[in-house]
Amino acid sequence: MMKYLQKLGKSLMLPVACLPICGILMGIGYALCPATMQGGEITGFLNLLGFFLVKAGGALIDNMALLFVIGVGVGMADDNDGTAGLAAFASWLMITTLLSVGSVTTMMPSIADDANKSLAFSKIANPFIGILSGIIGATCYNKFKATKLPDWLSFFSGKRCVAIISGVVSIIVSAILLFVWPIVFGALIAVGNGIAGMGALGAGIYAFLNRLLIPTGLHHALNNVFWFDTIGLGDLTHFWAGETSADVSWSLGMYMSGFFPCMMFGIPGAALAMIQTAKKGKKKVAIGLVASAAVCAFVCGVTEPFEFGFMFLAPGLYVIYALLYGIFTFITTLVGFRAGFSFSAGSTDLLFSASLPAAQNTWMIIPLGIAAFAVFYLVFRFAIIKWDLKTPGREDDNVETEKKAVLSNSDYAEVATIILEGLGGKENIASLDNCITRLRLEIKDYTQVDEKKIKSAGVAGVMRPSKTSVQVIVGTKVQFVADEMKKML
């Protein structure tokens, strides 16, 4: 199970790498054109440029689920074949169409009369369904890519049948979700109703659950309870309508304010911890991923590039991360800092919400931010080192060192043949994959592996992480060896 989650985490790295640019574009865009966030007329070169940048960044962040569909589909496939990505996309289209509000209310008219169920299906196109579709596409590819059909159906043999099978599986999954999804969504709304009466503690619990549910997309259920007028709260809508706490039954802004110190300062603190704890040869990689993500979070509150960068690599750390949000939201509510957002809790929203009537003690973002930076930094640094967590830059692959590995035999077919013999022959191979410098193989019988034979091929080394896994360190020419070995398999 852990290996599966690690593979899922790695498959998410490609779509995650697309996200930092959208956050930076949106942050600059909002700064140039506040009207894209606050409403109003958009005129003049700078405003139009800002609008242009916001839309450019939004093209990715608004379709993040689709990035996960393709990324997970291809990344989870045994040989990273694009067919799996196509099958995953077919699955996504099937599920999101069958479970759209229009479809489900036609099949089950009673849903139209239930506001919670209608709301649930209006949020079906989310990252969780994207990841689920990716898994369906990749799993169908791995199991059915070599399927042989009768002659009269031979056109659909092999990879051509994968998308068809993933479509059938998606219909079954959609039928299950038709009944399960509104129950889960409704349960979260019920939890929101209970939390609403708990004051500052409830605000902290909400913030914790909000972050915890990000990977599933179910945080939308809680957001609709607390930010909008699903049950009569509407913290966001009332705040931006120019009202104050005197106009509502709660402390206006309490369900938004705690996100500001966490996103603006806590994430940069956590990012610094990740950079400092990255392996010596991988610090540049860590900086490239998490530093840009920290800038996104500070400027406009786009946190997904940071969160999806480690949530699957170190799920325990992500739970701690969510807990820190809960703690800071509880503290922020008690000390009286109030700010609101219409997009997310970045510096841009803080700047423009500070002039609204409900805003209070906005100067406190400085001490709260310093505290958040320090706490997130110390907690992340301690947890990463204490439990040797595989955050960005701490993966097991020593890529920088292995890039220097020199394959002593330039006959790739011969190298592949010797390695295959040393692994016990093709009958002993369960799966073959490769990263930048290594062959990654799953084997059936570890007793048949002959490390001396493998090393005689001129490779740099052999690693055996478990009884079913073998990794052969080849160097940067690994792709050529992998291609020859795949032909033999």
Image (tube, rainbow, N blue to C red):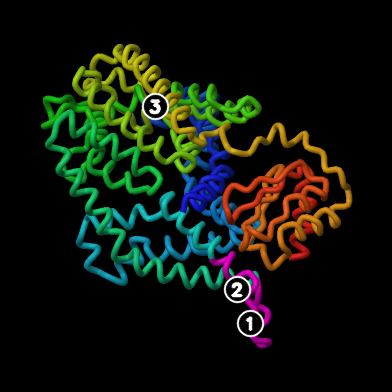
| Quarter of the figure with residue 180 | bottom left
Distance between the Cα atoms at labels 1 and 2? 9 Å
The answer to whether 146 is drawn above or below residue 323 in the figure is below
> Quick check: is 143 in the magenta stretch?
yes
> Is residue 158 found left or right of 372 in the rendered image?
right
What label does residue 149 carry, if any? 1
Residue 319 visible at all: yes
Numbered range of the magenta stretch: 140-158
Circles 1 and 2: CB atoms closer than 8 Å: yes
Q: Secondary structure at mark 1?
A: loop
Specify few, some or many for label 3: CA neighbours under 10 Å numbering under 14, 14-19, or 20 or more. many
Distance between the Cα atoms at labels 1 and 3? 54 Å
Q: Nearer the viewer, residue 392 or 289?
A: 392
Magenta span: predominant SS is helix
Instruction: Report which residue position mark 3 lands on.
Output: 263
Q: Earlier in the sequence, mark 1 or mark 2?
A: 1
Give residue 363's position: percent from left, percent from top. 30, 11
Instruction: Report which residue position mark 2 lands on.
Output: 161
Q: Secondary structure at mark 2?
A: helix
> Is residue 119 found left or right of 317 in the rendered image?
left
Q: Secondary structure at mark 3?
A: helix
Q: Nearer the viewer, residue 277 or 311?
A: 277
Give residue 434's position: percent from left, percent from top. 68, 50
Q: Amino acid at mark 1?
A: Leu
The answer to whether 32 is drawn above or below residue 449 in the figure is above
Q: Amino acid at mark 3?
A: Met
